[in-house]
Image (cartoon, helix red, strand yellow):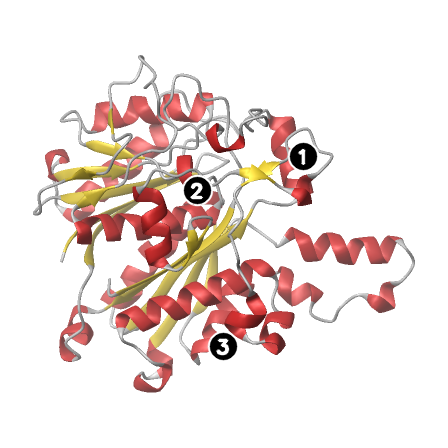
Amino acid sequence: MTGVGLVTPGGVGAPATWVTVCAGRATAGRDEALAGLPVDISCPVPGFDGDALLGRRLARRLDRVTQLGVVAAREAMAMAGLAPGDLDPARVGVLMGSGGSSLAGVVEAHQRLLAGRPETISPTALPRALPSACAGEIALDLGATGPAFATVAGCASPLLAARIARDLLGSGELDVAVVGGAESLRHPLTVAGFAQLGTLSRRTGDPAAASRPFDADRDGLVVAEGAAVLVLERPSHARARLAPVLAWLAGCGAAGEAHHPTSPDPEGAGGRRATEAALADAGWQPADVGHVNAHGAATVANDAAEAGWLARALPHRPPVTAPKGALGHAGAGSGAIEAALTVLALRERLIPPTANLDRLDPAFDLDVVAKAPRHVPGGLGALTVSSALGGQSAALLLRCA
């Protein structure tokens, strides 16, 4: 891994997001786009100006989620020291995780159709709504002609994309893989659906304190938006250009639960088996995991299931952090954001705290970092894990460069 790009509620750019999570600063607030709904709070990306960052012509063609992804990809490539002209375009692939279609454009087009004005629907409405739109636009922006597609498995999508990218690099088909995820849950239809599922925090009177992963008083997630991109390279390619390596992808794992379409298995079978598969893939023992970037959605059932399987799978109790306390839940965007933050934690030898963790649920046998960052010694690896509606989980093991 040679480059990281982040566009999150913590700010535009990896440095801004890193400062936010290390400060344990929650970003949730009232959201005018959700006015009138029972839950009207979210974590938006602050001060994001697509026209300024991408140029007005490109920004007008892309929906907001894709704009976030393209900006993150540009930052990741710049950090890696890669420019499109430096690469064989056929040996660069783009794999972006997605939770599904972009609702904003679909709903707008449908409203025009219902109003009897189909001729006013934008010709870009359909291509913008494709789950693969972000991957395709990043490939176009980079001039990459290798495989460019989306993995679609909810929050686990970006980690599955990384697994596939690792295989494409290992087979020699690609030299560089641009991997990540971008999504926004800040749409009234999404929020209304989550509200009906009972998964949203109702702490609307104190939005900044609403997302509380692993806290005894957690009551649900807070929706967010964001994107993150990682640049992965074949080792020989990175060595040939003397690239600074941020971290190594050591192991990947994935598993399903076949338990329920929306509720997690109380035993957390998917997350545990995905982690065990990643450990086997890396040839690691559980004790080789020095810290965990947890899914930590802040819902009652998901956090309980995750805390249980983490304690069983990693009995040495490595430190755990959960960025959704600060950044909210951006669906597939969060899976990528948390992987990127794990890379930065390894590089900085620093684990960010879990925002809003005031009182760890006494039922959880976890060492969750809270209040202040925690320094960790080098030499150990890290686990990042994501779980999705439908029971799919994925895990990555990363080690220091």
**Which amino acid lies under the numbered mark 3 shown in the image of this protein?**
Leu
Q: What label does residue 192 carry, if any? A: 1
From the viewer's perspective, is residue 262 above or below residue 392?
A: above
Residue 284, given in percent of the width and then of the height, sits at 12, 42
Q: What label does residue 356 carry, if any? A: none
Q: Which residue is mark 3?
A: 140
Mark 2 or mark 3, earlier in chain: 3
Secondary structure state at the residue bearing disc 3:
helix
Q: Which residue is mark 2?
A: 327
Q: Are marks 2 and 1 in contact (CB under 8 Å)?
A: no
Residue 55 in which image quadrant: bottom right
Q: Are marks 1 and 3 in contact (CB under 8 Å)?
A: no
Observer-side mark, 2 or 1, equals 2
The residue carrying pointer 2 sits among few (fewer than 14), some (14 to 19) or many (20 or more) residues within 10 Å by Cα, namely many
Farthest right residue in view:
116
Can residue 213 be seen in the rendering of this structure? yes
Can residue 268 be seen in the rendering of this structure? no
Q: Quadrant of the C terminus?
A: bottom left
Residue drawn at point x = 13 percent, y = 74 percent: 239
Mark 2 or mark 1, earlier in chain: 1
**Which amino acid lies under the numbered mark 2 shown in the image of this protein?**
Leu
**Camera-side residue of 90 and 321:** 321
**Camera-side residue of 28 and 320:** 28
Give the CA distance from mark 1 to mark 3. 34 Å
Secondary structure state at the residue bearing disc 2:
helix
**Residue 235 left/right relative to 37:** left
